[in-house]
Image: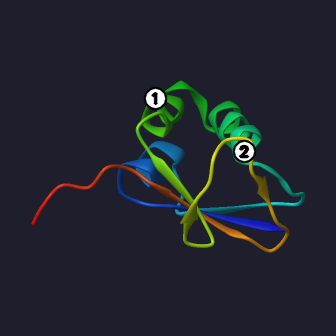
Amino acid sequence: MIRVRYFAGAADAAGRDESQLDTATTVGALKQHLADAHGPEFAGVLERCSLMVNGSRLGDDAAIPDAATVDVLPPFAGG
C-alpha cells in the first residue's frame, strides 16, 4: 500500500488531503495515475509539484516501494 499525501494547492485540486494505492509502481506511473484520477485541473498543478518518496526526490523511472509515503508538494513561497 502506498500512502499519497497532498499539500496546499495540490490538495485543493485533488479535493482531498490523502489517498492510498494498493500496488507499488514507479514515480512516473504514479504521476500519470494521479493525473487521470483527479482530472485536468490537478494534472496542471501536478506539473509544478515535487513528489517526495519517503522524504527523497526520485526520478520518474524509480520504483516506489510498498508501504511508502509520497508527498505531493507544490512550490512554496515565503520567507
Q: Residue at x 59, y 30 (%)?
A: 39
CA–CA distance in space, label 2 to label 1: 15 Å
Q: Is residue 62 left or right of residue 16?
A: right
Label 2 or label 1, whichever comes before in sequence order: 2
- Which of the two marks, 2 or 1, is nearer to us in this view? 2
Residue 65, how many percent across, how many down?
82, 66
User: Compared to 26, does 22 lie above or below?
Assistant: below
Mark number, residue 30: 2
SS at circle 1: helix
Q: Residues within 10 Å of mark 1 (few under 14, many from 20)?
A: few
Residue position for label 1? 44
Residue 36, how many percent across, how many down?
69, 31
Task: Identify which residue, 41 or 4, lies in the foreground.
Answer: 4
Q: Residues within 10 Å of mark 2 (few under 14, many from 20)?
A: some
**Looking at this rendering, what residue extends furthest in the left direction?**
79
Query: Which corner quadrant holds the N terminus?
Result: bottom right
Q: Is residue 15 left or right of residue 32?
A: left
